[in-house]
Amino acid sequence: MSPHSKLIPDDSPLANLDGFFAALGELPVLNPEQMGILREEELLESLTVLFLEMAGTTIDAMVAALEAGDIRGLSSKAHLLKGSAVNFGADRLVAVCQEVEQSAARLKEPTLQKLLDAVQAEYQLVRQALTAA
Amino acid sequence: MKIIVAEDDPVSRERLKSTLSKLGHEVQAFPNGGEAWEAYQSGKARLIISDWMMPEMDGLDLCRAIRKTSGMDYVYFILVTALRTGGNDYDRAVQAGVDDFLVKPLDADSIWRRLFVAERILNYTVTIKQLKDLIPICMYCKKIRNDSDYWQSIENYFHEHTGSDFSHGICPDCYDQFSAESN
C-alpha cells in the first residue's frame, strides 16, 4: 500500500489512518538520491535555509486555516509545502502533505487534525535531518 | 536567453533561478503570476517557466494572458507540475497554450533538455516570422525574390526554405476562368 495514493476514503476510522502511517514509515525522511543531486548542484545549504524559513510559516498557516475552517487555504498551503519538500526528497512529509491537499475537502476536522499533527512531526524529522546533513 | 520564472515556493524558485543562471540565461524570478505578467509586458522574455498553482494569477491564467497578446514574438511556455498531475490537467494545460512541462522535483538535466528544445523551436518561429513578414513577391507572376536577388518560383522558394513540396491542383475560380478562355 503506497502512502502516495489516497488511503483515506472519508472521515476515516482510526484503522485507515493507522494503515496510512504504517505505510508512511516505509519511506525515507530524506531521499538520499535527491539529497545527492542538491549536493552535486551545490544548492543544499542555500535551499535548506529557504526551506526552513518557509516551512515553519507555512505550517503555522495550515494550523490557522484548519482552526478557521478554511479548507481551501489548508489544501493550498499543503500543496505549497509539498512542492517545496519534494526538492529534498522528503518523501514522508510530501506524502502527508499530499494527503492533506487531496483529501481536505472530504475529511472531517478530527481526521484533518491528526494529519496536520503528522505534518508537524514529519517536518521536525526533516528539519533535524537537514540540519545534520 | 531572457527567461521569466513564476513560482510561489521560494525553494523551487531559487533552484530554477540558480540552474538557469548557471546555464547562462538571464533570469527574472517572481513569486506569482501577476508579477510575472507585468514583467513580461515590459520586457522581451522569450521563455516562461511557471508553476501551476500560485496566488493572484496561476500558471494557466498567465499562459492564457500571454497567448492573447498579439504582435509579440512567440513565447515558449513551460509549466511546472507536481508528480501526480492527472491527464485531464495536462489536457487543460495544452489547451491553454502550454508548450512543455517540467515535473517536480526539478533537476538540472531535465531543465537543460527542455531549454534545448525550446531554443530550437523559438529559432524556427523566428524563421517563420521572417518568412511571413519579409517575402518580396512579384505582384503579377508571384515569383519571390530570394536572398541572392534572384526571382524564383514560389514552389522552389518554399522548398528551399522549408523542405515543403507542392501538389498542383486548380482552384474553382481559376477553373472557371480557364474553362471560359478555352471555350
Image (cartoon, coloured by chain):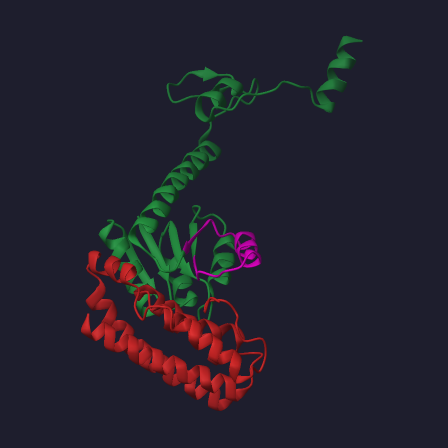
Chain colours: A red, B green
Please, is residue B88 above or below residue B71 in the view? below
Residue B165 drawn at (x, y percent): 54, 21
Residue B100 drawn at (x, y percent): 45, 50
Q: Quadrant of residue B49?
A: bottom left
- In the rendered image, the quadrant that contains the C terminus of chain B is top right
**Residue reaching furthest right?**
B183
**Residue reaching furthest bottom?**
A67
The residue that appears at 55% across and 23% down in the rendered structure is B139
Residue B79 drawn at (x, y percent): 44, 56
In this view of the protein, which residue sits in the foreground, B146 or B162? B162
In this view of the protein, which residue sits in the foreground, B171 or B97? B97
Please, is residue A31 above or below residue A114 in the view? above
The magenta stretch is B80-102
Please, is residue B137 above or below residue A16 in the view? above
Q: Quadrant of residue A108?
A: bottom right
Residue B90 among those drawn in magenta = yes
Q: Quadrant of residue B150?
A: top left
Residue A87 drawn at (x, y percent): 32, 64
The residue that appears at 43% across and 83% down in the rendered structure is A116
Residue A92 among those drawn in magenta = no
Q: How many marks?
A: 0
